[in-house]
Structure formats: structure tokens, C-alpha cells
């Protein structure tokens, strides 16, 4: 259920940033922000899921 909320959040974030503008550099900024947020969310999910702490990638 939490992953569904995360997906909706990422989609909303992408749409909000897209509304600001997809001109040249703006596109790379949007992609970088989305990747950073998704990466952090994935890492936090892995840390929370494992009782040991840091995930073994």
C-alpha cells in the first residue's frame, strides 16, 4: 500500500515539475530530481525492510 502512495507521489511530482517547463536544461533537472527521490525512497524502503539496517545490494 505504501508503494502505491509512493508511485502517486512521484507521478504528482513529475507532473508538477513538468508544468514548470520542459525546456532543454529543465528536462534534465526534472529527471535528476525524480531519480534522486526514487533512489532515496528505494534505499529508505530497503533499510526499513531489513532489521539489520543497511541493505546488501
Image (cartoon, rainbow, N blue to C red):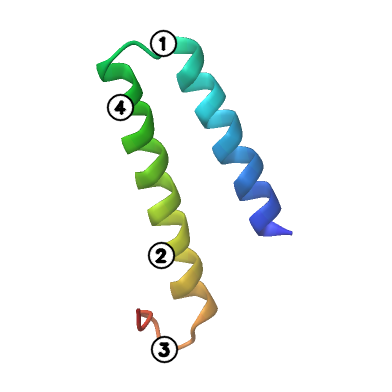
Q: Quadrant of residue 9?
A: top right
- The residue at which mark 2 appears reads as 43
Q: Which mark is residue 44?
A: none
Quick one: SS at disc 3?
A: loop
Q: Position of residue 39 (x, y in %)?
A: 39, 55
Q: Which residue is nearer to you in this view: 34 or 25?
A: 25
Q: Nearer the viewer, mark 4 or mark 3?
A: 4
User: Could you tell me which quadrant the N terminus lies in?
Assistant: bottom right
Q: CA distance from mark 3 to mark 1?
A: 42 Å
Q: Which mark is residue 52?
A: 3
Quick one: SS at disc 1?
A: loop
Q: CA distance from mark 4 to mark 2?
A: 21 Å
Tell which circle, 4 or 3, labels the residue nearer the N-terminal end.
4
Q: Which residue is nearer to you in this view: 12 or 24?
A: 24
User: Looking at the image, which residue is at 67% across and 48% down?
Assistant: 5
Quick one: SS at disc 4?
A: helix
User: Looking at the image, which residue is at 55% across and 39% down?
Assistant: 10
Amino acid at each position: 500500500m505504501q508503494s502505491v502512495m509512493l508511485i502517486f507521489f512521484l507521478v504528482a511530482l513529475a507532473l508538477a515539475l513538468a508544468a514548470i517547463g520542459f525546456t532543454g536544461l529543465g528536462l534534465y533537472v526534472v529527471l535528476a530530481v525524480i531519480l534522486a527521490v526514487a533512489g532515496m525512497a528505494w534505499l529508505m524502503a530497503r533499510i526499513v525492510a531489513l532489521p539489520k539496517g543497511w541493505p546488501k545490494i
